Image: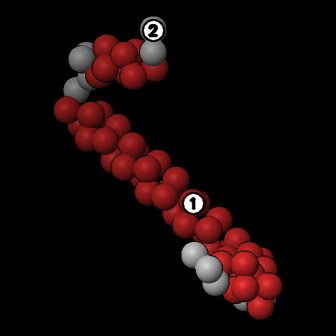
Amino acid sequence: MLHKEILLKELENVSEPILAEVLDFIRFLKAKTAQEKFSSALLSESVLAKDWLRQEEDDAWADL
């Protein structure tokens, strides 16, 4: 059984206050994941910029 199916089955027997907490936690996890991806991309930018900002890189893409 997939995790999603198991979760849906478990949620059928949970009270509204707990459902509200579960929803809040899911939203927290989604926001955390998005923030981690953004932070990773932001940190990578300075490293990759060393290659992006080279004249050789500009020359390689000039004909496109």
Q: Secondary structure at mark 2?
A: loop
Where residue 6 sits: x, y (%)? Answer: 40, 15
If the image is split into quadrants, where does the C terminus sit? bottom right
**First in residue order: circle 2 vs circle 1:** 2
User: Along the horizontal axis of the image, is 19 left or right of 54?
Assistant: left
Residue at 31% over, 41% down = 23
**Residue 52, relative to residue 25: is it above or below?**
below
Residue at 45% over, 8% down = 1
User: Along the horizontal axis of the image, is 51 left or right of 24?
Assistant: right
- Residue type at mark 1 is Lys
10 Å crowding of disc 1: few (<14), some (14-19), many (20+): few
Residue at 52% over, 63% down = 35
User: Along the horizontal axis of the image, is 16 left or right of 41?
Assistant: left
Label 2–label 1 contact, CB within 8 A: no
- Residue type at mark 2 is Met
- Front position in the image: 54 or 28: 54
User: Along the horizontal axis of the image, is 62 left or right of 27?
Assistant: right
Q: In which image quadrant can residue 25 be found? A: top left
Where residue 42 sits: x, y (%)? Answer: 62, 74
- Front position in the image: 37 or 64: 64
- Residue 10's disc number: none
Q: Which residue is mark 1?
A: 37
- Residue 1's disc number: 2
Q: In which image quadrant can residue 14 be found? A: top left
